[in-house]
Image: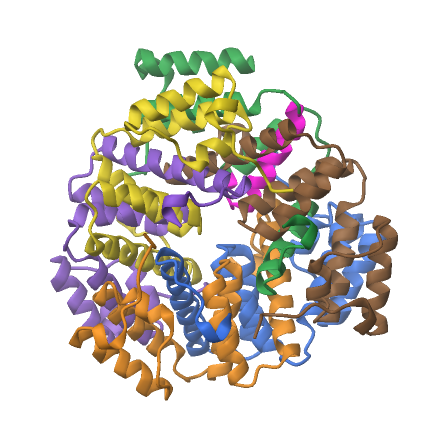
Chain colours: A blue, B orange, C brown, D green, E purple, F yellow
Amino acid sequence: MPQSEPIHYNDANPEVRAVYDDIMATRSVTDINNFWKHIANHPPTLKHTWEGVKSAMAPGALDSLTKEMIFLAVSASNGCQYCLRCHTDAARKLGMTDEMLGEVLAVVGVATQSNILATGYQIPLDEDLT
Amino acid sequence: MPQSEPIHYNDANPEVRAVYDDIMATRSVTDINNFWKHIANHPPTLKHTWEGVKSAMAPGALDSLTKEMIFLAVSASNGCQYCLRCHTDAARKLGMTDEMLGEVLAVVGVATQSNILATGYQIPLDEDLT
Amino acid sequence: MPQSEPIHYNDANPEVRAVYDDIMATRSVTDINNFWKHIANHPPTLKHTWEGVKSAMAPGALDSLTKEMIFLAVSASNGCQYCLRCHTDAARKLGMTDEMLGEVLAVVGVATQSNILATGYQIPLDEDLT
Amino acid sequence: MPQSEPIHYNDANPEVRAVYDDIMATRSVTDINNFWKHIANHPPTLKHTWEGVKSAMAPGALDSLTKEMIFLAVSASNGCQYCLRCHTDAARKLGMTDEMLGEVLAVVGVATQSNILATGYQIPLDEDLT
Amino acid sequence: MPQSEPIHYNDANPEVRAVYDDIMATRSVTDINNFWKHIANHPPTLKHTWEGVKSAMAPGALDSLTKEMIFLAVSASNGCQYCLRCHTDAARKLGMTDEMLGEVLAVVGVATQSNILATGYQIPLDEDLT
Amino acid sequence: MPQSEPIHYNDANPEVRAVYDDIMATRSVTDINNFWKHIANHPPTLKHTWEGVKSAMAPGALDSLTKEMIFLAVSASNGCQYCLRCHTDAARKLGMTDEMLGEVLAVVGVATQSNILATGYQIPLDEDLT
C-alpha cells in the first residue's frame, strides 16, 4: 500500500474542508496542492501546519517573493523534491526569473560548502561575535 | 591538538596573502574572519572557496541583503553555528531588522516542517509540476 | 551581539503573555523554557509554533511518553542539542528509564545506519511496497 | 550499471545464507527484504548490520511497535524513502493505525521545526539542564 | 515546467563553452555530464563550481581514486543519488572494485551510526583532544 | 542532569568489560575513548556498535588510513564534532599530514556543494548510468 492517500474535498470532513476553503481563499485558487490533501489524513496536522505556513508566508517585513525564495533554498538544502518544485513554481509566479533562481541556488551552494568547511576545520567564532 | 590553527596575514605565503588582500578590498574591511584564516591551511581551498563566495554573493538580480538572508537560512538549516552568526551579522549590517530576522527564521521553520511532512507522507508531485 | 535575547514575562506584550500563560497552564508549570522566550522575538512564530507543538504533543492515539521519545529521537537525528536535552528531560519526568533511553538511541543508531546503506546501495522498493 | 545487484539465496555463499536464515527465523518469514539482498554484496556489512538491527529492534524495555515507530520517524527525518516504507509497513503489521501514523509524523514535523528554530535563535540550555 | 533544462554545447554562449572545453580537456572525454549542462543555466555558478571541483579533485597528496571514494561517501551521506551514481562510476573507472565499494559504504554506515550515538549521548571530547 | 555518565572500567559489568578489553587489545591501547564509556550505558548498543566498527574499520581492500579519512569526511558532513576530532586524531596517527587533511576537507566541501546543486537543479541521471 502507498504511504498515504489524498483526501479529496468531497470526501473531507467539515474540519478539513474549512482548512481547504481557507487555503483556496487566501491564495485565490480553486484547487489545493497534493501536500494538503495528503497531510489531511491527520486533520490536526493539516490545521496547525496550514496556520503556521499562512502566518510565516504572509507578506510582512519581507515580501512574498523573498519568502518563497528562502523556502525553496531550504527545501533544496533538505533535499525535498516536492517542496522544492512547488515553491520554485510559486516563486516564478511572483516574478522570479531564471537568473534569480540561478542566484538563489548559487548562494545555497556556497553556503553549504562554507558550512561544511566551518565544521571540518572547527572554526571558532570571531571575537566580535562572541 | 585543535582541528586547525589560523594562518595570520604576517605568516601567510604570497598566494594566501593575495586572497586575503582581495577579501579586504572587496569588502572594504581591514581584517578578515576566522573562516578564511583557518581554511588557508589548504591554500587551494581558500582560493576556490573565496572565488565561489565572491561570485555568488555579489549583487546581481538579487541584492546583497537578500543573499545574506538566504545564506543565514541555509546555515540555520545545516546547523552551522559559525556561518549562522557571521551571516546574521552581515545581514544586520546591510539593514536586516529583528523583525526581518524573525520572518526569515519563521520561513525556515515552516519550510523544514513541510519538507519532513512531504517526505513522511511520500507526497507525489502535483500534475502541473510533472 | 548574541543571535537573540530572551523575552521575559514582565517585558512581554499581551500577545506573547497569552501564549506564555497557555504554555504554563497546559503543562502545569510556573516558568517556561528558554525556547519559548527566544522565539518570542517574533510573536507570530511563537504563537504558531506553540499551537503546533500543543496539538502534536497532546496525548491521543499515542501516549505522551511515546511522543516525547519520538521527539528526542528526531532531535538526536537532527543534531539539535537543545531539543535533545529538553525532551530527554521531559521523557524522564514521564517515566523513561535509562534503559528505555538506551533502547531509543539504539534504534536511532541502527535506523540511521540502515538509511545510509539503503541510499548507498540504491536499494529498490520491495515489490509488495510499490 | 546499477549501484548494486541483489544476492539471491541460491547464489549466496554459506556466510550470507546463515544470515538470511537467521533473519527468516527471527522474523518468521519465508523471504527477506531487498535491503539485506543488496548489502549482502559486502558480507561483513550484512552480518554486523543484521546483528545491530536484531539487537536494537528486539522487544525490551520498549515494545516492538514503539521501536518500529521510532525507526520510521528517523527514516522520515533522514529522507530515506526505502526505510520509511519498510518500517511503516512493519509498524502497520504490529498494529499501527492511520491515526497513530498521523501522530508520529505530526511529532516528527514539530520536532524538526523546533530543532531548526532552536538552532536559528541559538537558544542556550536552560539552567536546570546544564 | 521542469526545474531546469540542459544547455547543450551548440546552444551555449562562449563563456559556458570555454568551461565545457576545459572539462572535456581535463578529463579527456568528448561529452560532459548532465550536471554541468544544468548548472550552466547560471554561468557564474558553472564557472566557480568547475574551478572548485577541478582544484579539489586533482591528484595531490591524495590520489584520484581516494578522492572519488570520499566524494561518493559524502554523496551517500547527503542522500544525493545523482552525485552518488556519477562518482561511483568515476571511482570504478579508476579501479574501485565491488569489495572496495562495500568497504567504503561499511565505513559510511558505522560512521553515521557513531555520529548519531555521539550526539544522542552528548559525549564530551576526550581530554587529550580538548 | 547530563545526558549520560561514563561507565568506567572498574564499575563495568563483565559484559561491558569484555568489550572494553577487546577494544584495548584490538587497538593496542591502555584506555578507551569516552565514546565507548558513554554508550556502555546500554550494553547491547556498546557490543553491536563495537562489532560493527571493528569489522568496518579493519584493513581490507582499503587500508586503515583511507578508512579513517572517510570516517572523518562523513563526520564533518554530519556535523559531529566528537567523531570528527577523534577520527582526525586517529588518521594523523596513521600518517595523515595537514596537506592530506586539507585535501579531504576540500573534497567534502565541493562534494557537498555539488550535492546541493544537483538537488536544486533536479538534474536527471545521465543515460549511461540509468
Whole-percent x, y for residue E63 in the image: 15, 49
In the rendered image, the vertical position of residue C91 relative to residue E24, given as above or below = above
Task: Examine the image and state in which quarter residue C104 appears.
Answer: top right
Q: Which of C14 and D10 is in front in this view?
A: C14
Is residue D67 within the magenta segment?
Answer: yes
Main secondary structure along the magenta-highlighted residues = helix
Q: Which of C117 and A115 is in front in this view?
A: A115
Question: Residue at the front extreme?
Answer: F10
Whole-percent x, y for residue B120 in the image: 60, 45
- Residue at 47 percent across and 32 percent down: it is F37
Q: In this view, does E112 lie to the left or right of A86?
A: left
Which residue range is magenta in the image?
Answer: D62-81
Q: Which of E27 and E73 is in front in this view?
A: E73
Q: How many labels does the image show?
A: 0
In the rendered image, the vertical position of residue B126 relative to residue E123, given as above or below = below
Whole-percent x, y for residue C110 in the image: 49, 32
Q: In this view, does D78 lie to the left or right of E56?
A: right
Whole-percent x, y for residue A123 in the image: 39, 62
Is residue B91 within the magenta segment?
Answer: no
